[in-house]
């Protein structure tokens, strides 16, 4: 939830729930809340993983997967629920983080591609686009230090944080990747984190039913043993 004026709060969640605009009032020392609107993600800005940004009287964010044709698009809305512009079907952003700096939005896609967008009220203007990492699920929040933008994909950050002898457990939330591709993706992350040698990392994996989906579960740990993969 974010304040969008002196007496209004915009609240949003994912998974088809949508968003609410709340108006706060005070009378005689008592406060009351009015629901101005309560709409699904097909009718108003909603965000699934990241918090929207309120800037110059407008709300900016990435639409969730259940937003219909706007799925994954970076959008700009008025607090009253009116859309000002969207990035378009050819410029989808996934569920990655975004940050506002120097009158520009920096948006990181699911596969760690970085897009720079002009923070204008009038239309979507892309100022730059580049592939930054080779990672997957690059959903962690940005950190901005001076002119340096710090970012990581999920698995690289996890391997960098793993101390010798520590255990890392991760899984594919969709099971859509083949096991070999999923293991290969983790190996790339281990290499970027300086854990690429075969005597540093070993893992085991399995297929387990969860919520009626087949998921890959992989555990990796730093140890003096060879790479092993089991089903």
Image (cartoon, helix red, strand yellow):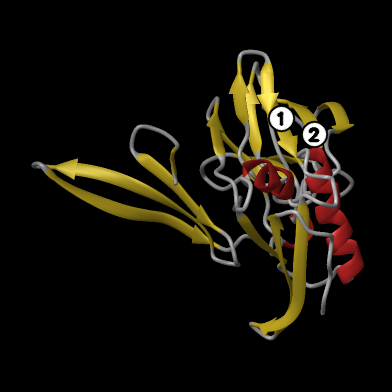
| Residue occupying the point 62% across, 60% down | 41
Q: Position of residue 26 (x, y in %)?
A: 19, 42
Q: Who comes first in sequence, dot 2 or dot 1? A: 1
User: Is 101 or 43 nearer to us in this picture?
Assistant: 101
Q: In the picture shown, does residue 24 fall above or below 18?
A: above
List the residue tagged with mark 1.
Answer: 106
Secondary element under disc 1, as helix, strand or loop, is strand
Q: Are marks 2 and 1 in contact (CB under 8 Å)?
A: yes
Secondary element under disc 2, as helix, strand or loop, is strand
User: Is 58 or 148 nearer to us in this picture?
Assistant: 148
User: Is 82 or 93 nearer to us in this picture?
Assistant: 93
| Residue occupying the point 66% across, 48% down | 158
Q: In the picture shown, does residue 188 fall above or below 143?
A: below
Q: Is residue 75 left or right of residue 16?
A: right
Name the residue at the front extreme.
Answer: 224
Check disc 2: other Cα within 10 Å, few if <14, some if 14-19, many if 20+.
Answer: many
Check disc 1: other Cα within 10 Å, few if <14, some if 14-19, many if 20+.
Answer: many
List the residue tagged with mark 2.
Answer: 114
Q: Position of residue 86 (x, y in %)?
A: 75, 42
| Residue occupying the point 69% across, 28% down | 105
Q: In the picture shown, does residue 74 fall above or below 16?
A: above
Q: Is residue 231 in view?
A: yes
Number of marks drawn: 2
Q: Position of residue 175 (x, y in %)?
A: 79, 73
Q: Is residue 129 left or right of residue 75?
A: right
Image quarter (top left, top right, bottom left or bottom right) of the C terminus: bottom right
Q: CA distance from mark 2 to mark 1?
A: 7 Å
**Quarter holding residue 64:** bottom right
| Residue occupying the point 22% across, 51% down | 32
Q: Position of residue 82 (x, y in %)?
A: 61, 45
**Quarter holding residue 228:** bottom right
């Amino acid at each position: 939830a974010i304040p969008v004026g002196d007496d209004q709060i915009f609240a949003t969640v994912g998974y088809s729930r949508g968003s609410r605009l709340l108006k706060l009032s005070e009378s005689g020392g008592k406060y009351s809340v009015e629901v101005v609107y309560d709409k699904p993600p097909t009718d108003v800005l909603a965000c699934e993983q990241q918090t929207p940004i309120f800037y110059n009287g407008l709300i900016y964010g990435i639409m969730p997967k259940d937003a219909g044709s706007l799925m994954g698009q970076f959008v700009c809305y008025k607090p009253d629920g009116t859309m000002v512009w969207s990035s378009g079907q050819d410029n989808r952003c996934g569920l990655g983080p975004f940050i506002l700096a120097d009158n520009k939005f920096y948006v990181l896609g699911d596969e760690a591609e970085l897009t720079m967008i002009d923070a204008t009220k009038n239309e979507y203007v892309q100022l730059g686009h580049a592939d930054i990492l080779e990672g997957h699920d690059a959903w962690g929040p940005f950190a901005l230090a001076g002119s340096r933008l710090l970012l990581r994909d999920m698995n690289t950050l996890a391997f960098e944080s793993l101390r010798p002898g520590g255990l890392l457990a991760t899984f594919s939330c969709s099971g859509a990747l083949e096991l070999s591709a999923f293991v290969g993706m983790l190996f790339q992350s281990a290499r970027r984190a300086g854990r690429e040698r075969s005597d540093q990392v070993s893992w085991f994996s399995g297929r387990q039913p969860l919520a009626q989906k087949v998921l890959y579960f992989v555990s990796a740990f730093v140890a003096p043993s060879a790479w092993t993969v089991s089903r």
